[in-house]
């Protein structure tokens, strides 16, 4: 009996040690094979893990994320339409590497060319769209570099629109993450293409019509649950690169790897990073935009109060656990009519584990006009009878 008690204690200790080991392991990112990498959460932009993230390296076709971003921004601004017919130049048709074999003089819609870039990483389609938007590839590259500066991509220099090896054409893993985030958060419809495994286009040339198959270069969408994209890249100088995105439980992660030594390995390493992010982190959201969280007193108005509603979305990336965001609502006092809908009348402050992590303005839900003669008369009568 005495011996049995010690045996039980021994196995309990072994079990406790095993649990401790697993907990420590889960909190550490496994070794990633690649010259540089970064893992970020898309909503907040918070970095979860990184290595050599600011090192400029050849990005190969991951470059096309910026090309796609400028295409979508041009369409949103009304500069192009998806059904515009784009005439392919000799320069665009001459692109080597990954392509859809466009012929000089061939016409395709902007939608077809964009789809070909997103799914099949087509260099010829990328240059054709660059020329259509900016007049020439060089002018489009200037747009790319200007946009990179606006986004704070400080270790990026673009030399072409498609990512073929060119002296000085470099990006950092962090910069790739930044432009990936801009694309997927501002234009989530990109996933209509980036999640497609196979599709077709139709070539229309002087030789007649012929169907051409598109196969996605990103195996992540076949191998990883929740994968949403985004872009592969490989050249002799760049080796194997990938900006991989996935969404689970309303949290979207971006995992970027550069200069990976083997083609399949880049997918496995990105999946390691994504697994780590989903196993260890969660996204906490504040009150929904437009939700009423209080009431502000208004003097001299047709109504005595106005609802205070949340203006901005606030999210916070936290380690997994049972803690939640707490909030403090501060509504201004002494408000006087007139009040316009959307006027700031307070703020809501969010905290996690006792530390402030974000805030949003509170705005008036509707207009409150100055009180007219009728209301003033009613108030006078009320005061008379009270007296």
Image (cartoon, rainbow, N blue to C red):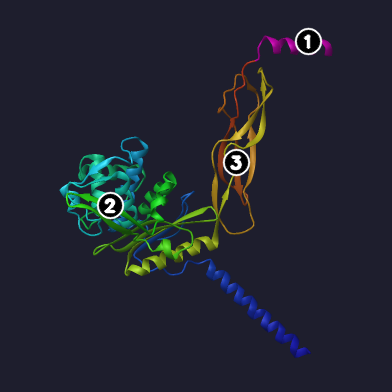
Taking 249 as reference, is 378 left or right? Answer: right
Look at 66% across and 79% down and name the residue there.
13
Look at 59% across and 41% down and name the residue there.
288
Taking 152 as reference, is 291 left or right? Answer: right
Q: For the C terminus, which image quadrant?
A: top right
Q: Closer to the camera: disc 3 or disc 2?
A: 2
Badge 1 is on which residue?
Answer: 381
Q: Closer to the camera: disc 1 or disc 2?
A: 2
Does the magenta run of residues contain 377?
yes
Q: Position of residue 176 (x, y in %)?
A: 36, 53
Above or below: residue 114 compared with residue 383? below
Taking 64 as reference, is 284 left or right? Answer: right
Number of numbered discs: 3
Badge 3 is on which residue?
Answer: 349
Provide the secondary structure element on which disc 1 rests: helix
For label 3, the crowd category at 10 Å Cα-Cα, with few meaning under 14, some 14 to 19 and many 20 or more, is some
Instruction: Check whether the beta carbons of the residues at disc 1 and disc 2 lie within 8 A of each other.
Output: no
For label 1, the crowd category at 10 Å Cα-Cα, with few meaning under 14, some 14 to 19 and many 20 or more, is few
Above or below: residue 180 compared with residue 378? below
Asked if one can make out residue 159 in the rendered structure from this viewpoint, the answer is: no
Q: Nearer the viewer, residue 104 or 219?
A: 104
From which residue to which does the magenta span run? Answer: 371-387
Provide the secondary structure element on which disc 3 rests: strand
- Label number found at residue 202: 2
Q: CA separation, marks 3 and 2?
A: 54 Å
Above or below: residue 254 compared with residue 108? below
């Amino acid at each position: 009996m005495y011996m049995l008690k010690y045996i039980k204690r021994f196995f309990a200790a072994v079990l406790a040690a095993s649990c401790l080991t697993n907990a420590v392991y889960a909190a550490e990112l496994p070794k990633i094979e690649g010259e540089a990498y970064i893992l970020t959460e898309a909503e907040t932009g918070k970095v979860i893990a990184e290595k050599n993230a600011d090192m400029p390296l050849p990005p190969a076709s991951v470059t096309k994320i910026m090309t796609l971003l400028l295409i979508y921004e041009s369409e949103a601004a009304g500069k192009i339409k998806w059904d515009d017919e784009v005439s392919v130049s000799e320069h665009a048709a001459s692109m080597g590497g990954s392509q859809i074999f466009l012929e000089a003089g061939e016409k395709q819609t902007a939608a077809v060319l964009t789809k070909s870039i997103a799914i099949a990483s087509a260099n010829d389609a990328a240059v054709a769209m660059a020329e259509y938007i900016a007049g020439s590839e060089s002018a489009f590259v200037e747009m790319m570099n200007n946009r990179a500066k606006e986004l704070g991509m400080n270790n990026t220099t673009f030399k072409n629109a498609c990512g073929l090896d060119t002296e000085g054409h470099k990006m950092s893993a962090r910069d790739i993450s930044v432009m990936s985030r801009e694309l997927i958060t501002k234009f989530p419809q990109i996933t209509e293409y980036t999640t497609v495994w196979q599709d077709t286009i139709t070539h229309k040339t002087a030789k007649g019509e012929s169907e051409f198959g598109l196969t996605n270069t990103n195996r992540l969408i076949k191998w990883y649950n929740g994968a949403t994209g985004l872009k592969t890249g490989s050249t002799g100088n760049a080796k194997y690169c990938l900006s991989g995105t996935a969404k689970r439980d309303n949290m979207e992660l971006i995992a970027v790897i550069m200069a990976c030594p083997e083609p399949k390995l880049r997918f496995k390493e990105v999946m390691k990073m994504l697994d780590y992010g989903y196993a260890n982190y969660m996204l906490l959201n504040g009150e929904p935009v437009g939700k009423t969280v209080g009431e502000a007193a208004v003097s001299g108005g047709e109504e005595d109060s106005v609802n205070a509603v949340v203006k901005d979305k606030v999210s916070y990336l936290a380690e997994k656990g049972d803690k939640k965001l707490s909030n403090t609502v501060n509504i201004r006092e002494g408000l006087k009519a007139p009040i316009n809908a959307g006027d700031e009348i307070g703020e809501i402050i969010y905290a996690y584990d006792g530390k402030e992590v974000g805030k949003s303005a509170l705005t008036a839900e509707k207009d409150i006009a100055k009180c007219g003669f009728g209301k003033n008369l009613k108030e006078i009568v009320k005061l008379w009878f009270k007296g």
